[in-house]
Image (tube, rainbow, N blue to C red):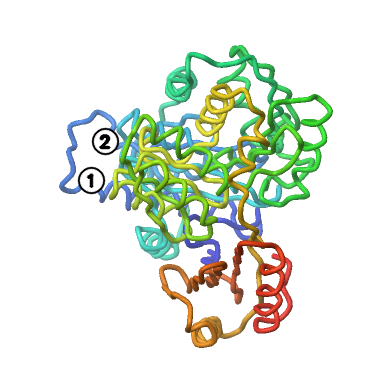
Amino acid sequence: MDTSIFKAYDIRGVYPDQVDEAAAWKIGHATAQFLRALLRGYERGQANAQCVCVGHDMRTHSPSLTRALIEGMNATGANVIDIGMIDTPQIYFAINHLGTCGGVQVTASHNPAQYAGFKISGLEAKPVGRDTGLKEIKHIASSLLHTHGKVSGSVEQVDLTVEYKRHVLKFLAPSLKPLRVVVDASNGMAGRMVPLLFGDLPIELIGLNFDHDGTFVHDPNPLVEANLAELKQVVVEEQADFGVCFDGDADRLMMVDEQGETVGCDIITALMVPYFLEENPGAAVVYDLRSSRVVQEEIIKYGGIPRRERVGHAFMKKTLRDSHAVFGGELSGHFYYRDNFYADSGMITLVHMLNIVSMHDAPVSERVAPLRRYYATGEVNFEVDDKEAAMRDLARKYSQGKIDDLDGITVQFKDWWFNVRPSNTEPLLRLNVEANDPRLLRDVFKELVDFLGEPVDH
């Protein structure tokens, strides 16, 4: 078994070279053992507490991998509730709605078509990553010598579409305007879920790339600006109020305004701050440390408590729970909600965007213009052999700034700041720089490039 498929937050690799049905069986076996062990000391009274929830995305190999995964789970005696082809946030809903000990979504998220993967969640849909169980699952799976065993667990097929729709739409405001919205499903799970959830609302949805047969017109990664080109064009041509582009498993989205301009995810977070804090005065809001300073400023302006966190859904979700924050936003397009089990959801984010746009007569571009008061590079990658040494050298070079090491190093000055953090899996440093004006941004970025070397495409 290729153990390199075990990443920081999930399991992912090329099918069938790295991830095949034999690997899926072992992963299912190991995951069921791990998740059921979590029940020790936990209330076992719920009918489904011993069950594991399983769903899958639209990739051509996902059904066969799901069958193998379930067979591996059944071989441990675990009962499985199979909820079929779903978006990833529905697995979080299902775990909590059904009261299972955890769940697995078979998905490679935003990766190209040849990839396969597994996202694992525990009790209450808490993420299972490298430091919260994935190492143990890797150890169990890699020690299994065969992929067969007596099946003693059961499989129940359940369709949660009605219940899930009720959950997502409970966040919809009653005063929804008749908006025109372009949705690029990226040939992913949004192509199935958006019509089911939003099809009977009094809005006009213009769909792009809704076919979900496992092939992609463009890679299902909305963070790549080139993948937004069609969406931008159609938003302008159709004179839509705004547009959104989902990733492959529909847990993330990007937004463009009515002029076809990308709205950064930190700007979306800032846009949501007054909307949430009006109903939840004094609440905490979580944001990842790559976000613009405008996010912290808006949270303080509207009486909230800013909670700055390191990058990654495991850290964001934990801080959200620990601080009872009302919501959180990450630069990658993940948005997390207290009232969604502290989990992220692309569909619920779309609901909140519909609400916010409906609340104001001004177009989206005018609403976000005051929030675009700083200038940023976006995330830029550099190939560096000794990442720790490079970060130490940067800390010495910029020692006159305010430095912290929450995630890599962040150095802050009055009129600019930067963060450099190491990749978990590659010899890369990831740089984000923001400044008060474009000339300063250009100058300090050039200075950092001179220090780190030329950027690389990753």
- Which residue is at a point 41% across and 49% down the rendered structure image? 286
Left or right of 407 on screen, residue 374: right
Amino acid type of the residue tagged 2 in the rendering: Ala
* Label 1 sits on residue: 39
Name the one closer to the observer, 270 or 199.
270
Name the one closer to the observer, 19 or 183.
183
| Image-quadrant location for residue 218 | top right
The x and y percentages for residue 326 are 36, 39
Q: Is residue 306 above or below residue 229?
A: below
Q: Secondary structure at mark 1?
A: loop
Crowding at mark 1 (Cα within 10 Å: few <14, some 14-19, many 20+) = some
- Which residue is at a point 59% across and 53% down the rendered structure image? 20
Name the image quarter holding the C terminus: bottom right
The x and y percentages for residue 264 are 62, 47
- Which residue is at a point 53% across and 72% down the rendered structure image? 422
Q: Which mark is residue 412?
A: none
Total numbered labels = 2
The x and y percentages for residue 93 are 41, 32
- Which residue is at a point 18% across and 43% down the rendered structure image? 42
User: Is residue 85 visible from the viewing direction of this image?
Assistant: no
Q: Secondary structure at mark 2?
A: loop
| Image-quadrant location for residue 370 | top right
Left or right of 112 on screen, residue 407: left
Give yes or no for contact between labels 1 and 2 (Cβ–Cβ under 8 Å).
Answer: yes
Q: CA distance from mark 1 to mark 2?
A: 8 Å
The x and y percentages for residue 409 are 48, 74
Crowding at mark 2 (Cα within 10 Å: few <14, some 14-19, many 20+) = many
Q: Is residue 93 above or below residue 429?
A: above
Amino acid type of the residue tagged 1 in the rendering: Leu
Q: Is residue 199 above or below residue 350?
A: above
* Label 2 sits on residue: 49
User: Is residue 385 visible from the viewing direction of this image?
Assistant: yes
